[in-house]
């Protein structure tokens, strides 16, 4: 999983401008809703394990979400979509589940990145069948990672 995470970060951050280094801030308090996909830094990853036989259903839901974002005219919703990319790992997890990495760069503070919430908001009550496919595809709760840059290897270190 660490190799997968490192590979995803390299691909995502390769063309991003360097940000000031520094130690990560104190651990954030847990979100009010334990299922919330919110992040405490400006870079977030959401790792989603999907049942192997339900991968096509999950992908159909992601494409529906992508289409809904593309049709949105609200600038705030467009801003959320601008920094949200979804990758499928070539490898599976130890249980054979497909792994999807949602890369959020930059994270918009206070935004909950749960796909089901966005489908509901963007589609004005998403079809029950679509939400059921999404829920049934998940192999477990997604892993949420708020990331703070430690070092950008393409620039000289900043002396402290």
Image: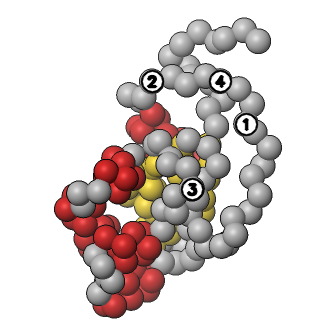
Which residue in the protein does label 4 denote? 21
Nearer the viewer's eye, disc 3 or disc 2? Answer: 3
Image coordinates of residue 72 in percent, x first then y, are 24, 61
Q: Nearer the viewer, residue 37 or 136?
A: 37
Image marks 3 and 2: residues in contact by CB distance under 8 Å: no
For marks 1 and 2, give the CA distance: 18 Å
Q: Secondary structure at mark 2?
A: loop
Q: Secondary structure at mark 3?
A: loop
Q: Secondary structure at mark 4?
A: loop
Q: Nearer the viewer, residue 96 or 48?
A: 48
For marks 3 and 1, give the CA distance: 18 Å
Q: Residue at x 29, y 57 (%)?
A: 74
For marks 3 and 4, give the CA distance: 23 Å
Compared across the picture, whether 150 is left or right of 25 comes to left
For marks 3 and 2, give the CA distance: 23 Å
Residue 24, labelled with which disc? 1
Q: Quadrant of residue 137?
A: bottom left
Q: Earlier in the sequence, mark 1 or mark 2?
A: 2
Q: Is residue 57 visible?
A: no
Image coordinates of residue 86 in percent, x first then y, are 37, 55
Quadrant the N terminus occupies: bottom right
Which residue in the protein does label 2 denote? 17
Which residue in the protein does label 3 denote? 110
């Amino acid at each position: 999983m660490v190799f997968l995470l490192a590979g995803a970060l390299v691909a995502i951050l390769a063309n991003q401008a360097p940000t000031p280094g520094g130690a990560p801030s104190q651990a954030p308090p847990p979100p009010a809703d334990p299922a919330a996909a919110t992040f405490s830094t400006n870079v977030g990853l959401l790792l989603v394990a999907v049942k192997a036989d339900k991968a096509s259903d999950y992908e159909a839901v992601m494409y529906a979400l992508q289409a809904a974002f593309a049709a949105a005219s609200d600038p705030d919703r467009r801003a959320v979509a601008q920094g949200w990319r979804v990758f499928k790992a070539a490898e599976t997890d130890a249980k054979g589940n497909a792994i999807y990495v949602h890369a959020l760069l930059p994270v918009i503070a206070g935004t909950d990145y749960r796909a089901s919430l966005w489908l509901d908001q963007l589609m004005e009550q998403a079809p029950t069948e679509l939400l059921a496919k999404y829920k049934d595809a998940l192999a477990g709760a997604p892993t949420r990672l708020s990331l703070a840059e430690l070092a950008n290897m393409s620039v000289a270190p900043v002396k402290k």
